[in-house]
């Protein structure tokens, strides 16, 4: 009998029958409030009627039109629609299938454009699982261990993780910028450095917003040294943070922007955007792929942009995110084991600690599992697995946020009781 790989760890025991909006209906007859959104993918909720209709219609026309062989209308329309939401300077787009693939395309372009070998990434970043993307990933050793050697030319600088250091944000930013300068002086000369790559909000690294002043410091150094600034917006982009792009809390514009996940409400498509001048510096034949820019996925992405705009979902993410944050902050006041609550919009993280202030992965894991019994689906993240992440769909309602908070509170109480009984 053939089975799924034993290396695939199931976060919940739920087997899905169908889903709609913020809700998943299991084959066991149970209904679950989904605060995972397929790891931030189902931006317009499950099976939004406009997305379903667009995909259904396109499937009847052509499913696979390999876009370096024949062009198709959905991709042309998507490119035009992206122009409405991308920073104006980023007027050239390359399409791929996964976030990892887009990340690798971005560093390839940066190296080709500059003629330099090195890429600087930052502690806690997650950029994918393929070899080059995993080489940039430090959200946890599980993403990069056991298949060395990894790609060369990668250097890691500190991220301003204020809570971990026990500092205020400004102190953490000053430290991280100072250490980056030291890295440029001692390990990777600016003349050898092709690019910086960073997430506007760390994803698997713990749902940590990158302070605007840190992004602005990276932009200044990139400009000064001719380094390409790459922003990995795979998880933070497409309205998730309460702005269309996560970097828009700062004053900067990246040289390359990477998008995927919420772009097509569940269909696999990713992209990098850059200026035409930068994109043209890539070598002939360096971009392509069999499934990149798939016609059905592109049609779904066009519909997704329409829904996000027509239903004002970026503003909904901001308002509902504020509501979620207020509720989580209230819970944290009454629970000393919640060390930190942070995030932007509908991308909120809850970091659990022990009585001694150390990462408490056991409690985070227990809460995530107890939430299933409360019919609430959550995921963990962070290098120690001690952060619960909440990622509702952008269409989530005020009532659903309140329901989620009630169920999370119940899961927290149940998990703490269970851990106490295990120690007794």
Image (cartoon, rainbow, N blue to C red):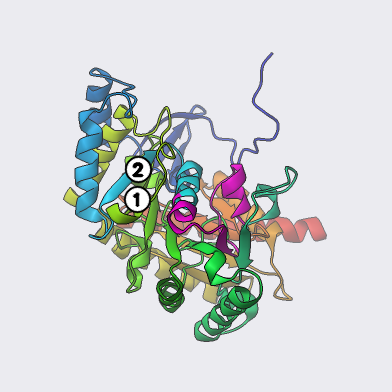
- Whether residue 49 is visible to the viewer of this picture, yes or no, is no
The front one of 124 and 69 is 69
Residue at numbered disc 2: 94
Residue name at image x 41 percent, y 34 percent = 288
Which quadrant holds residue 360?
A: bottom right
Q: Residue furthest right?
A: 424
**Image quadrant in which the N terminus is located:** top right
Residue 38 x/y as whole percent: 46, 42
In the image, taking residue 230 as reference, residue 191 lies left or right, namely right
Look at the numbered discs 2 and 1 and tell me whether their residues touch, using CB distance below 8 Å: yes
Residue 246 x/y as whole percent: 37, 62
Q: Earlier in the sequence, mark 2 or mark 1?
A: 2
Residue at numbered disc 1: 279
Residue 274 x/y as whole percent: 33, 54
- Whether residue 33 is visible to the viewer of this picture, yes or no, is yes
Q: Is residue 298 above or below residue 318?
A: above
In the image, taking residue 232 as reference, residue 89 lies left or right, namely left
Residue name at image x 32 percent, y 34 percent = 47
> Of circles 2 and 1, which is in front?
1
Q: Is residue 36 above or below residue 177?
A: above
Which quadrant holds residue 24?
A: top left
Q: Is residue 124 magenta?
A: yes
Q: Which residues are magenta?
A: 109-137
> Circle 2 — which element?
strand
Mark 2 and mark 1: span between their CA atoms?
Answer: 9 Å
């Amino acid at each position: 009998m053939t089975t799924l790989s034993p290396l695939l760890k199931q976060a919940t025991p739920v087997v899905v029958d169908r889903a709609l909006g913020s809700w998943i209906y299991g084959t066991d007859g149970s209904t679950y409030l989904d605060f995972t959104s397929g790891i931030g993918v189902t931006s317009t909720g499950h099976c939004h009627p406009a997305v379903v209709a667009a995909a259904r219609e396109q499937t009847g026309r052509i499913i696979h039109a390999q876009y370096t062989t024949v062009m198709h209308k959905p991709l042309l329309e998507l490119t035009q629609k992206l122009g409405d939401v991308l920073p104006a300077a980023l007027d050239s787009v390359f399409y791929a299938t996964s976030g990892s693939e887009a990340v690798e395309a971005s560093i390839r372009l940066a190296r080709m454009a500059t003629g330099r070998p090195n890429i600087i990434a930052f502690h806690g970043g997650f950029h994918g699982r393929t070899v080059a993307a995993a080489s940039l990933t430090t959200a946890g050793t599980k993403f990069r261990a056991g298949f060395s050697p990894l790609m060369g030319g990668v250097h890691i600088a500190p991220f301003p993780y204020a809570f971990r250091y026990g500092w205020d944000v400004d102190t953490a930013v000053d430290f991280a910028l100072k250490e980056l300068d030291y890295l440029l002086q001692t390990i990777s000369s600016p003349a050898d450095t092709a690019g910086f790559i960073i997430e506007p909000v760390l994803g698997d690294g713990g749902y940590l917003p990158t302070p605007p002043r840190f992004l602005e410091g990276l932009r200044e150094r990139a400009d000064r040294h001719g380094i390409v600034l790459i922003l990995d917006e795979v998880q933070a982009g497409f309205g998730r943070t309460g702005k269309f792009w996560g970097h828009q809390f700062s004053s900067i514009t990246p040289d390359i922007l990477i998008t995927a996940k919420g772009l097509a409400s569940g269909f696999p498509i990713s992209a990098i955007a850059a200026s035409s001048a930068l994109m043209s510096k890539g070598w002939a034949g360096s971009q392509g792929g069999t499934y990149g820019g798939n016609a059905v996925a592109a049609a779904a992405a066009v519909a997704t942009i329409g829904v996000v705009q027509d239903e004002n979902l970026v503003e909904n993410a901001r308002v509902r995110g504020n509501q979620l944050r207020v509720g989580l902050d209230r819970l944290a006041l009454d629970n000393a084991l919640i060390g930190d609550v942070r995030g932007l919009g509908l991308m909120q993280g809850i970091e659990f600690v022990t009585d001694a202030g150390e990462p408490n992965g056991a409690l985070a894991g227990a809460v995530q599992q107890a939430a299933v019994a409360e019919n609430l689906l959550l995921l963990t993240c962070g290098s120690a697995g001690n952060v619960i992440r909440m990622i509702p769909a952008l269409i989530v309602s005020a009532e659903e946020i309140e329901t989620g908070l009630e169920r999370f509170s119940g899961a927290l109480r149940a998990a703490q009781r269970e851990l106490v009984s295990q120690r007794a």
